[in-house]
Image (tube, rainbow, N blue to C red):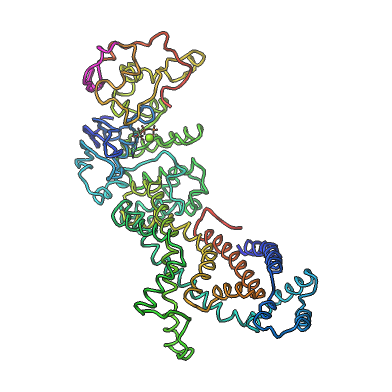
Amino acid sequence: MLKFILRRIMMMIPQLFILSVLVFLLAKAMPGDALTGQLASNPKIDAQTLEEMKEKLGLNDPVHVQYARWMKNLLQGDLGISYIHKQPVNDLLAGRMWNTILLSAAILILTYMIAIPLGIVSGRWTDSWADKLIVGYSYVSFATPLFIFALIMLFIFGFKLGWFPTGGSVDIQVEKGTFAYYLSKLNHLLLPALSGALINTVGTIQYLRSEIIDTKVKDFVKTARAKGVPESSIYWRHILRNSFLPIAAFLGYEITGLIGGSIFLESIFSYPGIGQLFLQSILQRDYSVVTALVMISGLATLIGTLLSDIILSAVDPRIRIE
Amino acid sequence: MTGKPILEIDHLRVSFRIQDQYYAAVDDVSLTVNEDEVVAIVGESGCGKSALALAVMGLHPPQKTKLEGSIIFKGTNLLSLSTSQLNKIRGKDIGMIFQDPLTALNPLMTIGRQIEESMDYHMKLSSMEKRQRTLELLKRVGIPNPEKTYHRYPHELSGGMRQRVVIAIAIACEPSLIIADEPTTALDVTIQAQIMGLLKELQQQMKTGIILITHDLGVVAEMADRVAVMYAGEIVELADVETLFHHPLHPYTRSLLHSIPSAQTRKEKLHVIQGIVPSLQKMPRTGCRFQSRISWIDESKHEPNPILREVEPGHWVRCTCYQHFYFPHDHIGDVGYGIS
Ligand SMILES: Nc1ncnc2c1ncn2[C@@H]1O[C@H](COP(=O)(O)OP(=O)(O)OP(=O)(O)O)[C@@H](O)[C@H]1O
Ligand SMILES: [Mg+2]
């Protein structure tokens, strides 16, 4: 098991390397650089000063030298300096990273809290009115783009009803570390998390539903019934356990989806996380931040895949990792 | 062989709902199984053998299936029981062996747990006793190294070994009736013989009644006391095994027996009646259902509403067409099996 994990981590290195080259080249190929942005806002800078600044930042070096320098810093945990925010990317990310992880975890928990009961009801009582309702809900949420849904939620529950704050991750007045602080954090988290979860549940509900429908007609379920096992145990011990397998294994892959979703959610709810920062940085051509974030999400995706494989081997005896 | 009846199936009809209409897959079947008796059910694929077996076990999905008639097991009509009442009988008094050992076991449960599970509900045993009993069962069905197998998962066992486990599950609570639905069809030929040998040995030790569904007439000859031949949902002939093999009457039975390739006839052409069992929706519901497959026999020789008639004590045949049946000389097929 440990050997497997180590081998997989070794395999990530070339994947991350390729990603880093692509990201770096792409960032370089984009029109303009961070200084172009500053130039526009500050016409007083003359061409010579600009050239000096470029030289100082190493922007005139050959591409491979720039890449090597970036890579060397990256490996030392230095993600570079944001030209826009005028501070190290590391500092910029620190707080936001936690906010995003918090939001993603909340979405994931809410997703499973909603999707698992609904999926079970839907799969067990197929074609009942409850099933039809649930399938209807999943069609609607499948057809609704996340950002539109999030906007509607924000409008209704944030602005119209005023039940939830409309932005930020915590009230400014509350003192860090107090109970009120955590309560305020939770309060800010709830609306974006719920918006994300309500859209995110579809996949899990449909997956679970069809797994249950497939599993309940399997031969081994007949064997269990022929043993005289009561219906409730038939479901828990035989059908649901087998149906949960792919869901559990999918958990790691969810990470990719959550990263993508956080870009919309955080931007719409002005939630200071890395998704919001990502979008801002692209718009402001703050490439050192963009490249850092792409690398981080690439790493997170790879770790998610590994996590899925580990979970699957833990829950399914047919899959053993040596 | 002449024990008391333990299972009496009476005018059983099993119908499946297909697009708001019910179609009978088992039609007016009456059959008795006595204590310590092996009754074989033979017939082509799709003739309703599994549908019959599953009806006895109460394993048909209730929303899609209609069951009429009665199935009396030791004095109780199984068709009138609720699921929880039925659960007190199945696994305890009736055990079932399924066709495909590769899919009949839960992939996520150890062999030991799957055998013990039926004891959980039918026997008051401590977990130590259950374990002990499971190990004995594993030994009894011929599994080498029971201690180790107890902790194994199904995928770690071969098909033959898995079928032994399925048998162990079926006999775990010493049932008085076992229903075996083609227990060897999915296995290699050599393994088939071993499993049949095991089943026969267990039957002799435990004196259970067995309903043995099979395609293999060799197995029937070796194991069965009585044989029911099914065609298109109906029993067309019912007799003890000697009578059936030596004096088959119904054209369908005769064609089945004709189509066993034996050592002497291997080189010759065999009589095979062409055609297949019609699908549920296309099945003729009146007259002799075999009529279309023996078209050279004059229509007037069939009964308009054929019934299963006792032509000699213990020998039942459906329809009168058997009295006039002959194999046509130009109707000789290639070497093949009347039943697939
Ligand atoms: N749940 C069901 N719904 C609809 N039709 C069914 C269902 N189960 C069986 N049938 C149909 O009923 C008929 C009898 O099927 P059954 O499985 O009993 O045949 P069988 O004699 O066991 O065949 P085999 O030798 O292939 O196992 C077939 O035409 C089959 O298609
Ligand atoms: Mg069958």
In this view, the residue farthest toward the top is: B329
Which residue range is magenta in the image? B298-319
Q: In front here: A101 or B44?
A: A101
Q: In front here: A200 or B260?
A: A200
As drawn, A194 above or below B153: below
Place of residue B35 in the rendered image (x, y in percent of width and height, measured from the top left)? 27, 35
Locate residue A195: give its quadrant.
Answer: bottom left
Q: In front here: B5 or B316?
A: B316
Can the viewer see residue A271 in this picture? yes
As drawn, B191 above or below A219: above
As drawn, B234 above or below B297: below
> Is B308 a magenta residue?
yes
Q: Quadrant of the C terminus of chain B?
A: top left
Q: From the viewer's perspective, tell me whether residue A151 is left or right of residue B179.
A: right
Place of residue A172 in the rendered image (x, y in percent of width and height, measured from the top left)? 47, 88
Can the viewer see residue A238 in this picture? no
Place of residue B72 in the rendered image (x, y in percent of width and height, measured from the top left)? 21, 38
Q: From the viewer's perspective, tell me whether residue A24 is left or right of residue B82.
A: right
Please tell me which residue is depicted at 38% across the width and 9% down the height of the picture: B328
Q: From the viewer's perspective, tell me whether residue B15 is left or right of residue A273.
A: left
Place of residue A22 in the rendered image (x, y in percent of width and height, measured from the top left)? 69, 64
As drawn, B275 above or below A29: above
How many numbered discs, if any?
0
Please tell me which residue is depicted at 31% across the width and 31% down the height of the picture: B281
> Is B184 a magenta residue?
no
Q: Quadrant of ligand 1?
A: top left
Q: Quadrant of the N terminus of chain B?
A: top left
